[in-house]
Amino acid sequence: MLPLRTFARPLRSTLTRQASIAPRQTVAFPNQLAAAARFASSCCNGSDHSPPTATSKPRIMAGSTPKDVEEYLKQSHDRIFENNRKWATQKKEQDPGYFVSLSAGQSPNYLWIGCSDSRIPAEQITGLEPGETFVHRNIANLVVNTDLNVMSVINYAVRHLGVKHIVVCGHYGCGGVKAAMTPKDLGLLNPWLRNIRDVYRLHEEELDAITDEEKRYNRLVELNVVEQCRNVIKTAAVQQSYKKNHYPIVHGWVFGFNDGLLTDLKIDFESMLAKVQKIYNLSDE
């Protein structure tokens, strides 16, 4: 495996550079919590920040007074409710019975397991409407068998909602993947990001053979998605439902910021399921 220090250098990202990253100093935090806080401020941002444009939303600038901050917080809060009222009005104008149907219950076809990165809203990038996708998001789109949150989501989506597709979606330039390969103590995040280091260990020979640093990161993003798909398939809910109903199918996708397109990694679900069940067979109820 390549020395970890080779991963500490910033990637030459294809993304638009955005405004400044949060300062490294965090006051009144213990060292490990401070490290975690620094990471959280840019957690899934695979690139540096660029200067704000004329169309940028208002932000708290250096030298702002407490009154300025108070006003900004009020405006940024009120803007959400203004947008919500506009959205609700538009939906009712388009379909007077829209909210009657929405309140009747949900029957989504898709379970989306994605990254917490704020730039990847599942419904917007797929063109789906409310009620069509059951969504779970976390740092670096991980599916960890000890994480009761994601395990509960999978169980509910499969056994109760009857989803037909489970999508694990990562994204190129993932800051979570980058942070996992950086030789720093990130405190509370260490055990979470260790799961990505394990992905590297499993595919060490392939990744070490990639000399271009950015391509190596991108490939690690893809392999992380593949391994999380495998973790989904290891669950009893998925295996038992597929045996009985022939669904859900598990997919691995990666989103690209440079073009806004999804890449299908074309997971061979049936082949992966057969290999998983040699050891992790939970298909009998």
Image (spheres, rainbow, N blue to C red):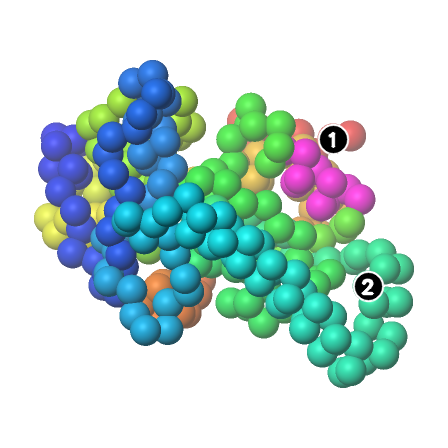
Q: Is residue 254 visible?
A: no
> Dot 2 corresponds to which residue?
102
User: Is 83 positioned to the left or the right of 219 in the image?
Assistant: right
User: Is 267 positioned to the left or the right of 8 in the image?
Assistant: right
As displayed, is residue 152 above or below residue 257? above
> Dot 1 corresponds to which residue?
284
Given this view, does label 1 or label 2 mark the residue nearer the observer? 2
- Amino acid, disc 2: Leu
Q: Residues within 10 Å of mark 1 (few under 14, many from 20)?
A: few
Q: Find the distance from the CA under tag 1 to the CA under tag 2.
A: 35 Å
Instruction: Verify whether residue 13 appears in magenta.
Output: no
- Amino acid, disc 1: Asp
Residue that protrudes farthest toward the bottom in the picture: 94
SS of the residue under disc 1: loop
Task: Tell me which segment is drawn in magenta.
Answer: 151-160
Q: Residue at x 88, y 67 (%)?
A: 100
Instruction: Verify whether residue 156 appears in magenta.
Output: yes
As displayed, is residue 273 above or below residue 265? above
